[in-house]
Amino acid sequence: MKIKKAWVHIGMEKTGTTSIQNFLGKNRERLADQGFYFMKSTGLANDVRLVGYCLDRNQTNYFLFRNEFVDSEEKKDAFDKEFLDSFEKEISELPSDVENVVFSSELFHSRLNKPHQRQKLRSFLENYFEDVAIVGYIRPQVDVNISLYSTSLKSGGVEVGLEEHLERCHVSNYFYNYFEFLSGWEKSFSGCSFIVNLFDRKELTGGDVVSDFCSVCGVDPTNLASAEQENESVTATGQEMLKAINRNLPVFLEGAGLNYIRSNFVNYISRIYAGSGEKPGKDLAYYTQMKFDSINEEVRRRWFPERTVLFDIDYEKYNGGASIDYSAVEFFEKLLVEVSKTSRAGLVGINSNKINGLRDAAIVLEEHDIKSALEVMQVASILRPEGQGIKRKLSDYREILHRENGKG
């Protein structure tokens, strides 16, 4: 028996998506009392696993796949099967009074940019739901790019300055072409509810995106816990420190997955230097945004015909450069250089014998629990990334698990 409705929040990036996800995750049990449910098997707080399922077999550069070592089409097939099994188990156990399931990920916008990927998502949803509604938010392209700058630095995606980052903000870039983005989703989900709102306090119900999203879906937020508004930007000094991290510490460690030492540094800088980052001057901001005038007019006519212009932008807020503490940045980079030279084990005060103990414990576990053996050996690999024997064992364990997950 199918569930009544799926609400699919497709972002886009930098429109309060994380705040919506935090709200949904924080109120998962209370939402169920209203007949709503926020899935766990699809990604817990962000439906990254559902996005991964919809990607092509050869798109193994996806960050989730890199961290889970899904590096071949066969392993992607095993991932898909494991995902479907866990999803079907979770949805079969939902309370009978749940009539609405909510999905949310900004990666729906940025990753599912091909019709066949969106069709895979639609086919998947139609197996479990009677109806599907698509919900999205948009804001001025220049604001998205500026807000995305700090996020890109945190993810290791860029080391460039803001002006060069702004050069990526152009009509031929799908990420910023809202007409192509919205019309593609509307076409892929023709016949479904399609709701797009402006990410602007003056336009949002209750003045914030969480209240607006609740209003769209029919959730009563009165007795639900509020979620802190996420501010992912860092100051200009923090942005320079993030560039230093990107120069010295890789996002992934070969054979071990995500570099948690790098992640800890990024989290530290993000907390200490939280605040408004570098901004372009008024003229540059205007020039960047005006490139989208004709595209945005198409969006206005199609989805916002009651408005005279799509976005009401105050360019006076763009005041150019920002103060940077270069002495702090220089000291921080020197620290990173030394960290990059130090063994992982040395950084946390673990001697070689203890790493050997972890390795040997994993070998004992492999006889009856490959998954636990993999987890223990991954710790050994993080501490001794150059260990060839550890790498071989990790590869063996992953192959076994992928074969098991790929079985019918």
Image (cartoon, rainbow, N blue to C red):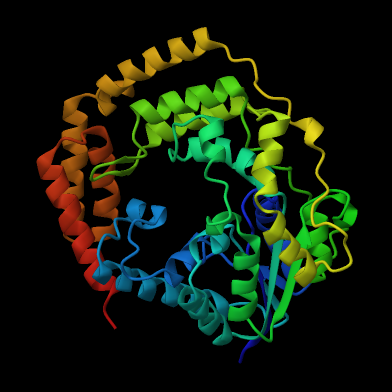
- Relative placement, left or right, of 125 versus 159 is right
The spot of residue 286 in percent (x, y) is 71, 39
The spot of residue 256 in percent (x, y) is 27, 44
The spot of residue 168 in percent (x, y) is 52, 45
Where residue 3 sits, quadrant-wise, is: bottom right
Where residue 6 sits, quadrant-wise, is: bottom right
Residue lying at the far bottom in this picture: please name it.
1
The spot of residue 214 in percent (x, y) is 80, 63
- If the image is split into quadrants, where does the N terminus sit? bottom right
The relative height of residue 152 versus residue 16 in the rendered view (above or below) is: above
The front one of 168 and 373 is 168
Residue at x 82% of width, y 39% of height: 314
Where residue 270 sits, quadrant-wise, is: top right
Residue at x 70% of width, y 32% of height: 283
- Asked whether residue 293 appears in the rendered view, the answer is yes
- Asked whether residue 27 appears in the rendered view, the answer is no
Residue lying at the far top in this picture: please name it.
327
The front one of 386 and 279 is 279
- If the image is split into quadrants, where does the C terminus sit? bottom left
Residue at x 55% of width, y 64% of height: 108
Residue at x 61% of width, y 43% of height: 145
The relative height of residue 297 versus residue 145 in the rendered view (above or below) is: below
Tally the marks: 0
The relative height of residue 352 versus residue 313 in the rendered view (above or below) is: above
- Relative placement, left or right, of 184 versus 49 is right
